[in-house]
Image (spheres, rainbow, N blue to C red):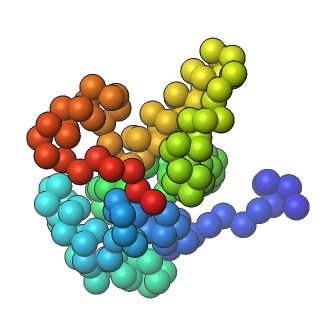
Amino acid sequence: MTSSEQRQRTLAEKLNHLFATVAPHGRGPYSNEEAAQAITLAGEPISGSYLWLLRKGQRDNPTLRHLEALAKFFGVPPAYFFDDETAAAVDADLALLIALKDLGVREVALRTAGLAPESLAMITEVIERVRQLEGLPASAEDSAEGSAEGEDLTPAG
């Protein structure tokens, strides 16, 4: 089957994938209520029951503002919900994030020994993208400032 013949994923499938893969640090997925509260606190009112309806496919035409708020909450571009190529790229990033969590940071660091500077730069870019998806500061300096404020910065996993 060619890519043009592949079935497009529904909004519910994409949303459920985000709930399954973008989880809070050190625990399982967000509940609909938790996500709704965070999105509402960020300025776009939405209810847990409405998220449930979206995730079940019983509602499939949310407002653009709701989609933008959901995208912001999960740390993905709004195009994730509209463009299957963007969704595929984001899903690849999320898969890498899961793999990095499973491997553990130490094992990843040990595997970089002997790599060319260009390869290390590429790995750094991937790590920065993963930090962005996790909602973490972009740099070590930002992390140090966060831990000075008592923020829990231990790796997930």
The residue shown at (69%, 22%) is 115
In-front residue for pair 71/65: 71
- Residue 51's image quarter? bottom left
Residue 94 visible (yes or no)? no
Dividing the picture into quarters, in which one does residue 26 lie?
Answer: bottom left
Horizontal side of residue 28 vs 127, given as left or right = left
Position of 138 relative to 75 (above/below)? above
Name, please, the residue furthest toward the top.
117
- Image quarter hosting the C terminus: bottom left
Q: Check the picture and name the quadrant holding the N terminus.
A: bottom right
Q: Position of residue 101 (x, y in %)?
A: 51, 54
Is 120 or 40 nearer to us in this picture? 120
Q: Position of residue 13 (x, y in %)?
A: 55, 71
- x%, y% of residue 25? 34, 59
Is residue 117 at all visible to an observer of this figure? Answer: yes
Camera-nearest residue between 43 and 91: 91
Of residues 96 and 64, the one nearer the viewer is 96
Residue 2 appears in which quarter of the rendering? bottom right
